[in-house]
Image: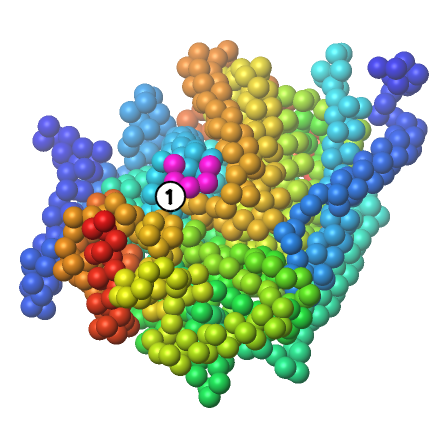
Amino acid sequence: MTSRLRGPGLTRGFAFFVAGVLFCAALVTGVRALYGFSLWDTSNYQNAVLIASLLGAPLFFLVGLGAFDYWFYWASGRPTRPEDHSGHGAHSWRDYFRVNTDHKVIGIQYVVTSFFFMFVGGLLAMVVRAELAAPGQQFVDTNAYNGLFSVHASLMIFLFIIPVFAGLANYVLPLMIGAPDMAFPRLNALSFWLLPIAGIMMTASFLAPGGSFATGWTAYAPLSTDVPIGQMFFTIGVQFAGASSIATALNFLVTIITMRAPGMSFWRMPLLAWANFSTSLLVVIATPFIAASQFLILLEYALGFNFFNAARSGDVLMYQHVFWFYSHPAVYIMMLPGFGIVSEILSVKARKPIFGYRMMAFSLLAIVLLGFTVWAHHMFVSGMQTWIRIPMMVTTAIIAVPTGIKIFSWLATLWRGVLHLDTPMLFALGFLTMFTLGGISGVMLAMVPLDIYVSDTYFIVAHIHYVLFGGSLFTIYAGVYYWFPKMTGRMFDERLGRLHFWLTFIGFNLTFGPMHLIGVQGMPRRVADYPEQFAGWNLFISLASFALGLSTLVFLYNIVASWRGGPRASANPWRALTLEWQVSSPPPVFNFDRVPTVVGGPYEYGVPGAVHGIFQPPATARPRQPAGAIGASEHEEHT
Amino acid sequence: MALEDREPEDPRSASAGRRELRQMLVIGAIAAAGGIALALLIDWFPTAASRQAGPIDTLWDVLLIVSVPIFVLVETVVLYCVWRFRMRPGEEDEDGPAIHGNTKLEVVWTAVPAVLLVILCAYAYVVLTDIEEAQADRELPVRVVGEQFTWTFYYRGDGGKEIASSQLYLPAKQHVLFTVQSEDVLHDFWVPAFRMKIDAVPGIDTHIRVDTTERLGTFPVVCAELCGLGHSVMRQSAHVVSRQDFDSWMARRQQAAQAGGGGGGAQGGGGGGGEAADGKAIFTSAQPTACSTCHTLADAGATGTAGPNLDEALPGKSEDFIRESIVDPNAKIEEGYSPGVMPVGFGDSLSPEQLDALVEYLAEVSGK
C-alpha cells in the first residue's frame, strides 16, 4: 500500500486529490479568518472552499498521478533518464490508466474518454427530448431542464468533438508523417489527463447545491454571475479542457513542423496533417479567449469584480465579444479535422487522387484566417453597434467560398472513381450531404434580416446539429471505422457498421430536419415548455431522437465486440498509400523500425507504380512527384 | 440495370463522361425544380402583422430558391457517383483514373459562389435598410422593459407621465419605435408576427422599429434569450387593434393611472369587491410584481410554472409567512425550488397598502 502511495499512479493521485481539497479548505479558512469573515457563514464559506478546490485539487491530483514527475526531478537536479521508455506502450489495460507517453496509447485514451462523455451527453439529450415530447412539465423541473441542455452542449463540445479529433490525430498523425512519436510526449500525457478532470467536473455539477450550471454552454453574463454554485463547475471545467486543447495544439504544431520524415515536404503531407495544422493554429490563437471570458466570470462571481454589472459601469456585451472570438473559431476547430479525415477516406475509397490537393490545403488556411473575422454574426440581435453587422455578414458569407471549394473538390474526387461503399465511406458520404445542408443554413443565417428573425429559435438548433452532428460526428464515425483496424489490429463487423450508418443517417434527419420548420414557425430555443401549436412536431422529433439514441448502441456493441474478438486486421486492409498503413496493425511500439523516406504524394491512386513512402534511407531514394502533380513540378526543386 | 445493358463500354472512360454529365444535368434540373416547388409550398412563417414581414419573408423565399439547387447539385453528384461508379464484382483491385485537378473548374467553383454570395449580401443589405428605415413622422414610442420573468410596456401619457401595461397594445397601420431595456439579465424582445427581435441588455437601450399593418389580432410576445428559470413562460401578448380601440384603451389606462397606484393589468380587474379584488389586481398586473407570470393560482387565473404552485403551497400558511415570502423570498424555500430565483425587492416596490392587500388576498384565497 505504501509503495503504491509513493509511486505515481491513480492511487497516489486520489490521495493527493484529498490532500488538495484539505489544503484549499485550510487556505480559504485562513484567508477568511484574516479578513475577519465569519467562518460559520455556511453558504459563503462552503462556496469559497468549493471554488478553491475546483481550481486547486485537480492540480494536486495531476501531481499525484505523476504527470509532473519528470519535470520535478529535472528541476530539482535529481537524475532523470530522457530516453526512459518505461512509460511507453501498453501491455495490459492497466497501462491505459496511468501517465503514458506513447502517442498511440494517449490517442486511444483520448478517443475512449471522449466517447464515454459522448454517451453521457447523449443520455442528457434523451432526457431533454423526453421532457419536450409534450407541452407542460413531464419529468424534470425548469432548473433541471436548463441544466440538462447546458451540460449536454458543454460535454459534446468540450469533452467530445474537440478532444476526439485530438485523440484520432494523436494516434494517426505521427504515423502519417513518419515520426516515432509526438514532439513532447510528456506534455501529451499531461494534456490527456486534464481532460477527464474537465469532464468529471462538468458532469458532477448535477450534484452541486442548487443544481448544475443552467445558463447554456454560452454562459452569458450577467445571468451566469448570479446563479447557484453549479455554474463554477462549467467556468472552471472549461479552463482544464482549454488548457488541454492548447497544449495538444502546440504539440501538433511542433510535431508537424519539425518531425516530418525525410522527403515529406508540406506539399506531400496528407490532408489530415494539413487539417490538424490549421486546427492547431486556431486553437492556439483562439482558446485563450474563452479562458479569459471564463476567468472574468469567475472573478465576478467569486470576488465581485463587476466586469459585467451594468449598475457599476460594467459592460454586458463585452462578454459576448470575448466569448465568440473563441467560440466561432471553435466551430472550425470542430470541423477542420473532420475535413482532413474525409479527404483521406474519400481518396482511398474512391481509388483516386484527391482533386485539387493544393486548393484543399489553401482553403483550410483560408478558413483559419476568415474564421477570426466573423464572430459577431452570433450577435446580430445583441444590441451591439449596428454597423458591425454588415462586415460580419460579408465575411460570414465569404467563408462559404473555401468551404465550397472543399465540397466541390470532394465531389470531383468521387467522379469516375471506383467507390468502395463500406462503412467509413458511407459515413464520409453522409457527411458530405448533411454538412452541405448545415453550410447552406449557415449562409442563410449570415443574412442579417433573416437572422434577426430566426436567431435564438430552433432553426439555430437545427443548423448547429447539421454542422456538428451531420458534419463533425459523421466524420468522427468515419474516422473511427477507418482507423479501427490500425488502432486495434482487428476488423469491425461490416454489416453492423452499415446498420449503424443507416440508423444514424435516418434518425438524424428525422430528428433535426423538422427543427428548421418549427424554428421558422416561431419556437424559441432553450425552453422547457412551449405552446400547444408545436406539440405535434416535438413529439415526432422526440420519437426520432430516441431511435437516433438507440443507433449508438449498435456502434458501441460493434466496437466492443470487434475489439475483443474481431478477425485480425492486415497491415493495410484498405490498400492505402499513406505511411500509417505501411506498418503492422497495430503498429510497433516505436512506430517505424526503419525511418521511412517519402518519395511522392499521399494520394497517387491510379498512377501506375506510385509510392508515397519507402523504407530506405533518403540517399538511395529517388525523388518522385509531389501530391497534385499537375503544375507542381517547379515547386519540387525548392523543397 | 437496363442502362448498363445498353452500355457495354467502361463507365469510367472519358467518352462516357460527356453523356453522363448531360444525364446528370437533366436529373439535377428536374430534382431542383421539384425541390424549389416543394420548399416554397411549405407554410414556413407564422401570421405576418408588420410591414417588415414582407421583405423578410421574400428574402427567405429567395434564399430557398438559391439554396435548393446547390443542395440538389451536391446530392445528385453523390448519388449519381454511388450509382454509376460503385465498385462492382471483379473491380476489387482496380483504381480510378489519376485525375489530380482541373484549374479551369477550380476557378469556376471559386468565383461563381463568391459572386453569388456577394449578390446575396447586397440584397440582404437592401432588405436590412428597408426594414430598419426610420419613419420620422408620428412614430409611436414604446418603452419595453424586461425583467425575470415578465415584460412591461410603457407608453407616453398626458403630461409626460408614463403609463405601464403588461399587455402590448398597438394601433393598426402605425410606425412604432421600441426602446428595449432590462432590469436584470439579458432578455430578448421578440414578436414572431412582426419578425423583429432585439436583446434587452442591462445598462444600454436597444431599439427596433416595427410598422403594424391593417391586420388586427393578438400575437405572442416571446423572450428569445435564456434568462433563467422562467424563460419559457416569459410570454405575453401583443394586441394590434383599430385606431379607435387603441385610443379608448389608452384613455382607460390614463384614467386608471390618474386614479392612482399604477393600476391593474389588462387581464385583471373584475371579480368581487373590497380588498381581495385589489390584491388580485396586484397579483395579476405587470407592475410592480407580475406574480402571475411565475406562479399558478387558480383564483387569479394564473398558470406560471417557474415558481411554486400557490394553490398547493399556500394552504395552511400564515399571513406572516406569506408576507415574509414576498419581502424576503430566500428566507424559506419551497422544496424542489432554488434560492435566488424570485426577485428580491418587492418589499420596496410595493407600497405598504399594496403589500397588505396582496398578503390579505393570498391568505384569503388559500384559506378557502
Q: Residue at x 15, y 38 (%)?
A: A15
Q: Residue at x 63, y 41 (%)?
A: A435
User: Left of A6 or right of it: where is B79?
Assistant: right
User: Left of B82 or right of it: where is A37?
Assistant: left
Most distant residue in the front direction: B273
Which stretch appears magenta? A134-138
Give neighbour class at mark 1: few <14, some 14-19, many 20+ (Cα, 10 Å): many
Which chain is indicated by disc 1? A
Residue A114 horizontal/vertical position (percent):
41, 35
Pick whichever, A420 or B283, lies toward us.
Answer: B283
Q: In the rendered view of the protein, which quadrant contains the N terminus of chain B?
A: top right
Q: Is residue A509 magenta?
A: no
Asked if residue A457 shows in the view, the reply is yes
Q: Quadrant of residue A453?
A: bottom right
Pick whichever, A491 or A150, lies toward us.
Answer: A150
**Predominant SS of the magenta segment:** loop
Asked if residue A399 shows in the view, the reply is no
Residue A230 horizontal/vertical position (percent):
28, 50
Number of marks: 1
Residue B110 horizontal/vertical position (percent):
76, 52
User: Left of B51 or right of it: where is A534?
Assistant: left
Pick whichever, A39 or B183, lies toward us.
Answer: B183
Pick whichever, B104 or A58, lies toward us.
Answer: A58
Amino acid on which disc 1 is placed:
Tyr
Colouring rule applied to residues? rainbow
Against A387, residue A175 (above or below) is above
Residue A456 horizontal/vertical position (percent):
52, 54
Q: Residue at x 83, y 40 (%)?
A: B33
Q: Which residue is mark 1?
A: A145
Against B125, residue A357 (above or below) is above
Label 1 SS: helix
Q: Quadrant of residue B76?
A: top right
